[in-house]
Image (cartoon, grey):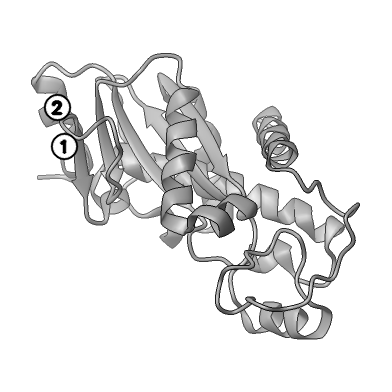
Amino acid sequence: MDDQQVILKFERELWNKGYKRIAGIDEAGRGPLAGPVVAAVVVFPPNVNPFLFKDSKKLKESERETLFYEIVNSCLDFSIGFADSLEIDSLNIYKATLLAVHRALKGLKEKPDFLITDYLKIEGYEENSLVLVKGDERSFSCACASVLAKVTRDYIMKSFEEIFPGYDFSSNKGYPTKKHIAAIDKMGITPIHRGSFGRVKGKRVRRGKDSFPLSVEERLRYYKEKLQELLGRD
């Protein structure tokens, strides 16, 4: 069995059962100390020729960015949802991730018939979902959702480099690198840091109230604006 058959195995089985709109789902940003968690949903036509055969985290950043636009231009439908760091602190990261997924699903043009997820159980789709371990390596739809989520989140985190200089967000994307931890120890945390995470819990907040929107609604609007910027670069 060749790579194309393997990566589309689950989708083909579902298409053959009569499901038309099969959505792949994945997220980016559950582990970082700062920034939103981002979920992506993507639906491909049954005649799609797969062009991605491995986990997006194993690709170079430039490769992911090229694939981002290929995915957007070849899919039937896609949507990206966000949950802010304030929501992560309030709900916990797992519940916030599910919130981002539901927001992404709500943004689709039509409700999907079936979901393939990278080990996420989605309420409302219990009877119509396939929850895969390492789904982003085994399902084309999941792998593409992973690319959409990661490229979008990386773009947002890079934008924070100018707003919060000194934390190296353009390189670490909010993950706990040595340079990021050193910056936190020296300068404190920013309003986009996840105050409930152990590595930053109890740290002083560096910035004032005017440095970044304090309301969740304004922050979600900012993320959506950055997504539109990213899409406009195609």
What is the three-letter code of the residue carrying label 2?
Answer: Leu
Within the image, what quadrant is residue 160 found in? Answer: bottom right
Residue appearing at x 64%, y 76% in the figure: 200
Residues 62 and 130: in front is 130
Q: Position of residue 59 (x, y in %)?
A: 46, 57
Residue appearing at x 68%, y 64% in the figure: 193
Let me know if residue 32 appears in the view: yes
Secondary structure found at label 1: helix
Q: Position of residue 23 (x, y in %)?
A: 32, 29
Please give the label number shown on residue 14: 2
Which residue lies under the disc numbered 1?
10
Indicate left or right for 181 with 134 as reference.
right
Residue appearing at x 8%, y 21% in the figure: 17
Residues 125 and 80: in front is 125
Residue appearing at x 83%, y 62% in the figure: 164
Within the image, what quadrant is residue 82 found in? Answer: top right
What is the three-letter code of the residue carrying label 1?
Answer: Phe
Residue most extreme to the front: 90
Indicate left or right for 205 with 120 as reference.
right
Q: Quadrant of the C terminus?
A: top right
The reply to whether callout 1 and callout 2 are in contact (CB within 8 Å) is: yes
Q: Position of residue 178 (x, y in %)?
A: 64, 84
